[in-house]
Image (tube, helix red, strand yellow):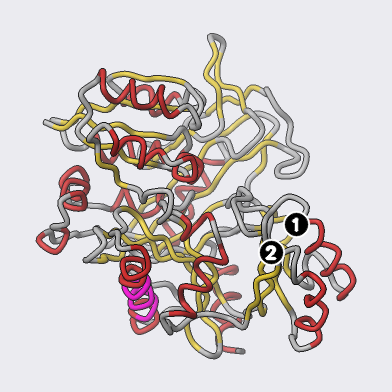
Amino acid sequence: MANVLLIGSGAREHVVAESLKKNKDTKLYSFMKANNPGIAKLSDKVEIGSYSDLEKIKSFAKENNVDFAFIGPEDPLNEGVVDALQEIGIESIGPKKTLAKLETSKSFTRELLQKYNIDGNPKFKVFNKDNVNEIENFLNESNDIVIKPDGLTGGKGVKVQGDHFNTKEEAIAYCKEVLGTHPSVIVEEKFDGEEFSLQCLTDGKTVIATPPVQDHKRAYDGDSGPNTGGMGSYSYENHLLPFLKKEHVDKALEITKKVADAIYEETGEYYKGVMYGGFILTKDGVKLIEYNARFGDPEAINVLPLLKTDFVGICQAIIVQELDRIKIEFEKKATVCKYTVPKGYPSNPVKNEKVEIGNVPENVKLYYASVDEKEDGLYMTGSRAIAFVGIADNIEKAEKIAEQAVSSIKGKVFHRKDIGTKELIVKKVNHIENL
């Protein structure tokens, strides 16, 4: 029997809740900032509140005799929820605030790789108000660049040359804008290649990879339009991707293992939880775009339904640092996840609009994200609404299942029809071959 506290209210946490509850002896206590109907149905008890209200979270954990916590999103990690729970003797799947800097401070991660001589870094420099006048010199020495605020931006603060700005003057202006709200800004060389996500579970000593996934950030078909939190993603039955070889996945895992070791060297503390690396395959090999200190959304929705090993047991092994004793297995299936989102998303989404779910095929998994369940039905709150996942023996079947399901939604919504399709995947394979 395990009493588990789950913090978070999105589709990522919905699939985490489902995975934890596969263990029939688990009682789930969910602390959410909004009432996710999918999580609520799986929970023994629910509390709604702010992730910054650490006292409320601690009280909820204590009164329900929680054994351990699973932290879903980045915000509570940044608030120091793991540290707060540790004060009352409750361990978490998720890093303490200082270790969560792996995600919350992009400069911390770049400088960590640099200091410990770990592969994967671009040419980069961190700027603050003291050396802001040196930005122009760095730009003169660089080709195309990427500008990243140092801190959490909900996945929408990064700006890429050629997509979001073109000139050196625009780059400098955005850097100065960022420095108005953030302590520093990172300017780094732009990589050309195909991105992939490698989400790893770690107890600080052992690091185990889940199947790689490719996410689609752009809002519209053909990878066009503004960046979003992620419109959908896919994974392959062979636990590779069409443009990835095993050696590329091994390289990404090797980088993550070295980063886990470096975090311990740097801080004297073990990182326990998820290290989700956003990598890119370039003509010069595998490079690191960034790390996240939790599962991806949507990428968790691709991998957790395939997990054959008891997830509660994995979490318990992470806490006592015995992950090396567990054989973690995933089904050899392909997955395609497609998000239905409100019209106008991400820049000007319709809000409080009702959605109706049609006849969803039985072989589809559905996960609620930003929705509100009222007496007369389901309403969107302005962000990604519902994720649908097709799981099958191959990508073609998985894509058809997901497309049929996401098309059943009625309301002021749209989705990307091309995720997981042969046309888009061939385009990505050709991109790598051309490089």
Q: Which mark is residue 307?
A: none
Q: Secondary structure at mark 2?
A: strand
Can residue 405 be seen here? The reply is no
Q: Nearer the viewer, residue 172 or 250?
A: 172
Above or below residue 362? Residue 324 is: below
Farthest-out residue, top: 375
Contact flag, marks 2 and 1 (Cβ < 8 Å): yes
Q: Position of residue 395 (x, y in %)?
A: 42, 62
Per the image, the residue denoted by label 2 is: 185
Q: Earlier in the sequence, mark 2 or mark 1?
A: 1
Nearer to the camera, 317 or 360 = 317
**Residue for point 32% across, 40% down:** 70
Tell me if residue 252 is in the magenta stretch. Answer: yes
The quarter in which the N terminus is drawn is top left
Residue that numbered label 1 is attached to: 178
Q: Is residue 276 visible?
A: yes
